[in-house]
Image: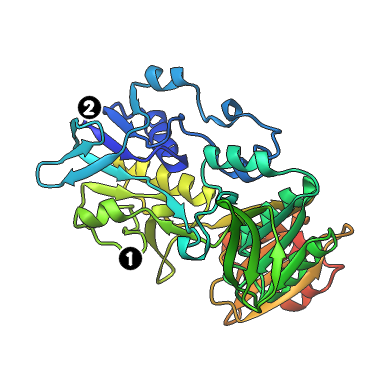
């Protein structure tokens, strides 16, 4: 048995790390320090089924409370780490206690960017969705006929827009960039998703910033947009990105850059300290990136667990993502960063389509819209390092499986 592992954070990555450690028969003492009052739970449904009240919090829990005691995992809820002493290898907790460690792991995730108070971001009726409490508050606002403004046309904002529209709200989305999903998807994918929302009555305004929110008695009632126009609103949902929770690591003298910098094994600049998930900046194909996804949080955490248990295998990310909007499922394999060409391929079913990304002639990612076959094939091509024949891929009569030959 090795010395204690202290995990800072109680989300997806924290749970995946300790669960994998125990699955690998690693019996070292483990303490999870979780700032939330709840046991670790799934976050993706918060902005979907949980917000629609189709799921309850107990169904989101990864494991019940008994699982932690049965696996000798000390979990401290509603508690934070306030200071790290790397020399003495101990942490100070918010309750004043001190906890020694042999290994420390950051799974602190990220925090949603909020609108500044100077433009009305502190008014009642303005929301972000990061935890179940945020979703609980927002769920009370989702009433038919009310007017919702979504600030930000990324995946989080668009998923929120879809839920609000499903609830019968009048929805306006504003995106400061030239198009929705500009940071994360091709123009072709943006056009497809834009069409999905507009066909359902969502007012999408691209290249449009927010000047300020207007309130009455502390409650938001309207929004003045960058073009000088004003729209009446009852609820504002903010989806303008996240900031890695790296302040504690930075204060401890670890190397950070909008995230905690780690190597291929998840180690920080201190070999006794690891970081994973949304808070980690990791090496990938000659770049340093943060992968904001559940898949990366799980895969990286499990790879680090294997390292702690004695493996010498580095973590080689195989990115994939998904987004559910209305009855549309967008599945993404690979990472389209830096693409210089796309190919749009119609699917075999009505409403299915895929967008294939290339960089300097090499296949790097696929966005599959209601097209599971394209997603699965693209994922297999990426894992095998195969760039498909462009002419065959463009031909809708080509059996996608033949591209794997």
Q: Residues within 10 Å of mark 1 (few under 14, many from 20)?
A: few
SS class, disc 2: loop
Relative to 332, say whether 42 is above or below.
above
Q: Residues within 10 Å of mark 2 (few under 14, many from 20)?
A: few
Relative to 173, say whether 134 is above or below.
above
**Is residue 122 something one can see in this rendering?**
yes
Q: Position of residue 203 (x, y in %)?
A: 77, 65
| Between marks 2 and 1 in the image, the one whose residue lies nearer the viewer | 1
In the image, taking residue 132 as reference, residue 72 lies left or right, namely left
SS class, disc 1: loop
Tell me which colouring the rendered structure shows. rainbow
Q: Residue at x 69, y 69 (%)?
A: 230
Task: Please state the total of marks drawn on the protein image.
Answer: 2
The residue to which callout 1 is attached is 257
* Sequence-first disc among 2 and 1: 2
Relative to 133, say whether 152 is above or below.
below
In the image, taking residue 298 as reference, residue 106 lies left or right, namely left
Q: Which quadrant, please, contains the N terminus?
A: top left
**Is residue 405 something one can see in this rendering?**
no
The residue to which callout 2 is attached is 1
Which corner quadrant of the image does residue 320 belong to? bottom right
């Amino acid at each position: 048995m090795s010395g204690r592992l202290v995990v800072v954070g109680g989300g997806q990555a924290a749970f995946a790390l300790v669960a994998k450690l125990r699955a690998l028969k690693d019996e070292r003492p483990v303490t999870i320090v979780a700032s939330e009052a709840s046991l670790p739970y799934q976050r993706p449904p918060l902005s979907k089924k949980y917000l629609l009240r189709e799921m309850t919090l107990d169904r989101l829990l990864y494991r019940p409370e008994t699982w932690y005691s049965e696996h000798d995992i000390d979990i401290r809820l509603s508690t934070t780490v306030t200071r790290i002493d790397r020399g003495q290898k101990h942490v100070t907790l918010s309750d004043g206690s001190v906890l020694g460690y042999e290994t420390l792991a950051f799974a602190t995730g990220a925090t949603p960017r909020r609108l500044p108070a100077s433009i009305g971001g502190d008014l009642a009726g303005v929301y972000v969705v990061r935890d179940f409490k945020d979703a609980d508050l927002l769920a009370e606002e989702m009433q038919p006929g009310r007017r919702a403004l979504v600030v930000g046309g990324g995946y989080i904002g668009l998923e929120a827009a879809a839920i609000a529209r499903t609830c019968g709200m009048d929805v306006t989305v504003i995106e400061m960039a030239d198009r929705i999903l500009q940071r994360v998807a091709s123009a072709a994918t943006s056009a497809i998703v834009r069409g999905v929302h507009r066909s359902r009555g969502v007012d999408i305004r691209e290249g449009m910033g927010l000047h300020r929110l207007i309130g009455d008695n502390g409650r938001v009632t309207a929004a003045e947009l960058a073009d000088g126009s004003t729209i009446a609103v009852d609820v504002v949902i903010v989806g303008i990105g996240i900031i890695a929770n790296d302040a504690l690591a930075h204060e401890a003298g670890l190397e950070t850059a909008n995230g905690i910098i780690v190597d291929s094994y998840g180690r920080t600049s201190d070999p006794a300290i690891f970081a994973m998930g949304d808070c980690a900046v990791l090496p990938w194909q000659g770049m340093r990136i943060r992968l904001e996804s559940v898949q990366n949080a799980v895969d990286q955490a499990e790879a680090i667990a294997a390292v702690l248990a004695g493996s010498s295998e580095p973590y080689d990310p195989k990115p994939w993502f998904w987004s559910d909007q209305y009855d549309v499922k967008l599945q993404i394999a690979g990472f389209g960063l830096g693409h210089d060409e796309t190919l749009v391929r119609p699917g075999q079913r009505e409403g299915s389509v895929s967008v294939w990304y290339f960089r300097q002639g090499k296949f790097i990612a696929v966005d599959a819209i209601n097209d599971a076959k394209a997603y699965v094939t693209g994922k297999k091509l990426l894992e095998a390092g195969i760039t498909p024949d462009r002419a065959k891929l463009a031909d809708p009569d080509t059996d996608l499986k033949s591209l794997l030959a």
